[in-house]
Image (cartoon, rainbow, N blue to C red):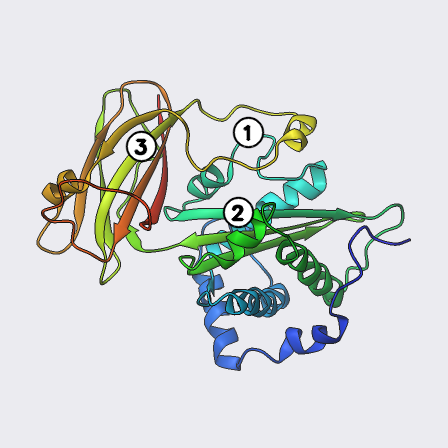
Amino acid sequence: MKPLYSLFVLFELIPALLFAQYSTNDIEYYVDLNDREMRLADYKDSREMLLLKLAQLEVVNKSRKQYKAPPVQLDILASRIANKQCKEAAEQGFRGHWNTRGEKPYQRYAFGGGTDHVTENASATWMEGGSFDRSPQSFAKLMVNLHGQFMAEIAPNDGHKQTVIDKYHNFVGLGCHMTAAEFRYYEEFIDRYAVTGPVPAKVRSGEEFTVEVTPAPGYFLYYAVAYYEKPPKAMAVAQVNRQSSYPDYTDETTLQYAPWDIIGYRTEGGKYNIPFKFDKKGSYYIQTMVDKKNPAGTTSFSTVGKIVATGIVVIVE
C-alpha cells in the first residue's frame, strides 16, 4: 500500500540526518533540557526521538538559511505541546490547528505553560489500507517530506512556508505521532524576546493582576494589547476538520497600552510591571511587542516591524 505523501522525499539524506549533524555535547545538552523540563511529562520525547528531532531541526534551519533567516533552536516545552496535539489528532482522526476541546495554537501553548508568541504549522498524512513502518527512518522520512511540502508552497498560498522563514522566530517545537495508519507532524515556531513572571491562569471578574515582562537584552517593551474571546468549547472531529487557518488575535480589543503608556511601567532593572483588569467573563489573549529602539518621547506609533514577544492567555471567571 502506498502512503499518501509525495515521493520527493530525500531518502539519501536520512542516515546523515539521523546521526551526523550534532556532536555528543549538543545531544547531551538537549537530553539534559529534556530531563529537566517537568511540564507535560506524558509527552516527553525518548532519546531516540529527540535525536530524530535534532536531525529535523537541521532540515528546518536549512530551509530558513535559503531565505536568509537565522537558525532556530529546538524548544522542549513547545515540542511536548506539539506531541500532545499530534497524538490527539492521529488517534482521534482530526487535523489542522484546533483540537476537540476547541483550543487554538496560542491557547494550547499557554495552557501547557508557555508565555511566548507561537505560530503553528500543521500537517497530516495517512495510509490507504495497511500500516506505517514504525522504524526511526520512517519517522524521519515523513517529517522531512511534510516539511518539504510546506516549503513547496507558492505565493499567495504559501502561509506555511512564510511561517518557516519568518526572520523573527528563534525557537521551534517539533511534534509527531504515528498510529497504524495516521501520521501527524506539527511545527510550533516561537518568538522568545522576553521573560515573564508568573501569570495567573484564571482570575475573577474585576480582579486586578500584573504581568511582569523583562525584554531580552537590547530590546524595549513597545506595546501591549489584550483581545477578548469566548472560552474554548468542545468541537466534534468534523468541525475541527472544517477549520483552515487560524487568527492570531480576535476582533475585540479590550485593553491596550501605547508606547507612552508602557514607559510608565518600566522599572530601573528594565522590567515592566503591567496591570490588567477584566470585567467581562471569558478568555483574554495578551500580546506584548518589543522593539530595539527606546520608545521614550514617542507621540505616535505603529506596530509594523515590531516583534510580538508574548502570548498569554487568562480566563476570567
- Residues at discs 1 and 3 in contact (Cβ within 8 Å): no
Residue at which label 2 appears: 120
In the rendered image, the vertical position of residue 252 relative to residue 247, given as above or below: above
Q: Secondary structure at mark 2?
A: strand
Kindly identify the amino acid type of the residue bearing the numbered disc 1. Gly
The image shows residue 106 at horizontal and vertical percentages of 45, 40
Most foreground residue, 257 or 274: 257
- Disc sitting over residue 245 in the figure: none
In the rendered image, the vertical position of residue 260 relative to residue 214, given as above or below: above
Q: Give the distance between the C-alpha atoms of the residues marked 1 and 3, in whole angstroms.
A: 20 Å
Q: Give the distance between the C-alpha atoms of the residues marked 1 and 2, in whole angstroms.
A: 16 Å
The image shows residue 127 at horizontal and vertical percentages of 83, 48
In the rendered image, the vertical position of residue 27 relative to residue 313, given as above or below: below
- Disc sitting over residue 226 in the figure: 3
Q: Earlier in the sequence, mark 3 or mark 2?
A: 2
Q: Callout 3 environment at 10 Å: few (<14), some (14 to 19), or many (20+)? A: many
Kindly identify the amino acid type of the residue bearing the numbered disc 2. Glu
Q: Earlier in the sequence, mark 1 or mark 2?
A: 1
Residue at which label 1 appears: 102
In the rendered image, the vertical position of residue 47 relative to residue 132, given as above or below: below
